[in-house]
Amino acid sequence: MDNIYDFIKKVKNNEIDIVEHTYKLIEECKEINKEYNYLNAISEDLALNSAREIEIQLKQKAKIKNKKLLGVAISVKDSICVKDVESTAGSKILQGYKPLFDAFVIQRVKEEGGIIIGKTSQDEFGFGGFSVNVGIGFKVPKNPFDNERSCGGSSGGAAGLSQKLSNHIALGESTGGSIVEPASFCGVFGLCPTYGRVSRYGLIDFANSLDKIGSIGKTIEDVALLMNVISGYDKNDSTSLKLKNENYESYLKKPVKGMKIGIIKEAFGTGVEREIEKNVYNGIEELEEEGAKTEEISLELPIKYGIATYYMIATSEASTNLAKFCGMRYGATEKLEGSFNEYFTKVRSNNFGDEAKRRIILGTFARMAGYRDAFYLKAMKVRALMINEYKKAFKKFDALVSPTTSILPPKFSEIEKLTPLQHYMIDVMTVSPNVAGLPHLNVPVGFEKNLPVGMLLMADHLQEGKLIQLGSAVEKGK
Amino acid sequence: MEVDKKLLEHVAEVARIKLNDEEIKKFLPQLKEILEFFSQLKDINTDNVKPSFQPVELKNIMREDKEEQCLSQDDALSLTEHKKDGYFKGPRAV
């Protein structure tokens, strides 16, 4: 397989017929989708038009050769708005919704010559860790290595397609682990940036203080390249960080000798499958062989209290965010009958799936008078303590490491038996870096029973570069 | 705290969701289990801790109070069938 830079070079030098290539790639997507359900919508017209435009500009010798993504296929998690392409966040309540504008990240991808190929499947609004909580009428994506198993979630379609489709990078989104966890289950790299590093403008939000858009790809080069394109300040997102852009690609292949890595003690042992541990330790060894120094560190809060803290914050924020879906301005609608409340209640009850209803109810409860202090505010305070604990660790370490998931991708028949709380537990390794807004990366480290295992690297705020540096060192060792 | 059918129905009503009997039967034990698990947060001492509403420190960003280009009225109305005389048409208010 070509690496992404070779591919872009060929496009620039007219060694690839980009229109024909894109046509074939769309056909390949359709074929893959028949078995794996990775795409809720394939944007064939948009993709072919973009390819034709590149062809014309190349013929006219227009100045497009500095474009970072020239001709590269980009898939988009369904929760990110693409102008004129159905964008549902995997929910029936948004079926038929074609945004009138592009999200900030989509504007950037288009400016850099990327070709948008479609919208990837996900848990409804991101509410899940296995992509089985899809909205009413949506299809569940399947693991690329075993179609009886989950590809993880909530950016399940994005991770699965990244494994199956070459010369393609995916835009994912994470609230509590929805980039790294599916990346782990599908054996690809997934980078979730620092909160605020990438604009959320045009993201159909789940939880405002937790949502981050990031990149998923087969190689560390893929995720670094796309991150370079999408990160940066945007005046349309009031939580966007006003900082200089960084060149993440400059960290690729940078030596890791002397870097200090903390192995989170509580993330190993009880509750973690032995095969997972073994492979993650192999990944850690590869970093040691490249000269990184490792040491065990004990963190009190993240593993033990992460799930409760995260789900309190996430459901509280989700319940307010989802209040806007009421069947009036866009999305699902019903016959205008009854009073305001009767109408809104009818639209919402008929169009939200089970998990969306559960989370709205949980979040509404946690914010209600009499319970707000004990649940919502308490979780926000624990978050403050957790950030402090991480910050202290990062005074000593460049990065922290744990498994990305504690289990191998489970079978759908096993997931069916889980209660919602047991379902939430899949996020045990990933929720806390998300709660603290820390950048984190999934690095594929091996296979067990023909299923991929991932290692999770976390760094301090705005230290995405270090993660790319470390991920690149593990990839090199293969 | 007693999480029972009455409380569940009340919270659902506040959230503008109508649960049928089957949903109530399914959700009630599930929500009980989750809330019980969440209660473990009370074991953590958070005296004198200020809540972190954002994971990174952010300043309020204001822009000048000047008119800027935004969605046209026609565009804004283009995504719904419920409209009249250039306005969204909603269900009756009273």
Image (cartoon, coloured by chain):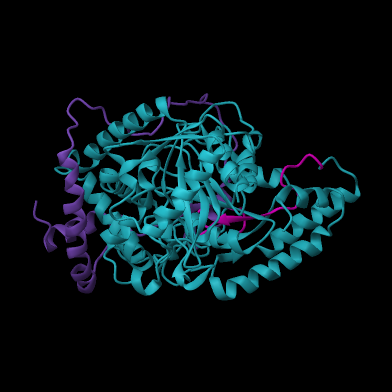
Chain colours: A cyan, B purple
Q: Is residue A285 visible?
A: yes
Residue A117 image offset from top left, x and y in percent:
65, 59
State which region is magenta: A65-88
At x 83%, y 48%, the residue is A12
Residue A321 image offset from top left, x and y in percent:
37, 48
At x 37%, y 55%, the residue is A406
At x 47%, y 67%, the residue is A449
Residue at the right extreme?
A60
Q: How many marks?
A: 0
Q: Name the image quarter holding the N terminus of chain A.
A: bottom right
Name above or below for residue A27 compared with residue A234: below
Q: Is residue A104 visible?
A: no
Residue A309 image offset from top left, x and y in percent:
28, 43
Q: Is residue B18 left or right of residue A455?
A: left
Q: Foreground residue, A23 or A383?
A: A383
Residue A294 image offset from top left, x and y in percent:
44, 36
Q: Is residue A462 left or right of residue A337?
A: right
Residue at the left extreme?
B2
Residue A409 magenta: no
Name above or below for residue A281 compared with residue A152: above
* Quarter assignment of residue A254: top right
Q: Foreground residue, B86 or A228?
A: A228
Q: Is residue A250 left or right of residue A461?
A: right
